[in-house]
Amino acid sequence: MRASNLVLVVLTLAAVAASPAALVQAEPAPAPPAAAQPVATAKPSTGTIAIDVEFLESSGVTLAERHARLAIGQTETISVQQGNRTISLETTVRAGAKAGCHKIDVTLRDGRIDASGRFAKTVWQSTTEPCTATPFVLGPKEETRVKVALKPAS
């Protein structure tokens, strides 16, 4: 080492030894934030979608058919009344995780009063995400089910 460098090192060490508070460790500079990677998400759907609903008995017999337009993101109720029986289907359609797909949430309530005046009620819920207009059946086999087809509203 050269004499001038040696004096500088000795003076620096002397200053640190004389004042322990002077010994401050500098924190490393924070790393620049990583560039945000674009995430591919489905474009949110807006507007309305047409829905065809067919109410099916457990035997497969069609009770009724309904056609409706649903606002995307809103819950709509589609009802059928036959004699002492009322079936209501609460339906919500949202944009799906994939482009061109829709997520559909349904809750079916089937209430009836038998000949002796007793009230019976069945409730079930289901969620699915169809990506085609092909009709699909929702609900347990031993209960009233629904066959649903989603179509772009025209």
Image (cartoon, helix red, strand yellow):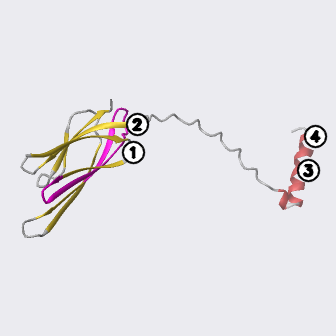
Quarter of the picture containing the N terminus is: top right
Q: Which residue is mark 4?
A: 4
Residue found at x 38% / y 47%: 74
Looking at the rendered structure, the kind of residue marked 2 is Gly
Q: Secondary structure at mark 3?
A: helix
- Kindly identify which residue carries mark 3: 11
The CA distance from mark 3 to mark 1 is 73 Å
Which residue, as the protein is rendered here, is positioned at the far front? 83
Going by the numbered disc 3, the residue's amino acid type is Leu
Residue that appears at 32% across and 48% down: 76
4 and 3 marks in contact (CB < 8 Å): no
Q: Looking at the image, do the residues carrying marks 2 and 1 touch, with CB atoms under 8 Å apart?
A: no
Q: Is residue 86 magenta?
A: yes
- The percent coordinates of residue 108 (x first, y second) are 23, 54
Q: CA distance from mark 2 to mark 4?
A: 79 Å
Nearer to us of marks 1 and 4 is 1
What residue lies at 13% left-to-right and 60% top-to-bottom? 84
Callout 3–callout 2 Cβ contact below 8 Å: no
Residue position for label 2: 47
- In the rendered structure, the answer to whether residue 113 lies left or right of residue 72 reads left
Q: Percent position (x, y) of residue 127? A: 28, 48
Q: Quadrant of the C terminus?
A: top left
* Left or right of 53 on screen, residue 29: right
> Magenta part of the protein: which range?
81-107
Which numbered disc, 3 or 1, marks the residue that appears first in the sequence? 3
Q: Which residue is mark 1?
A: 73
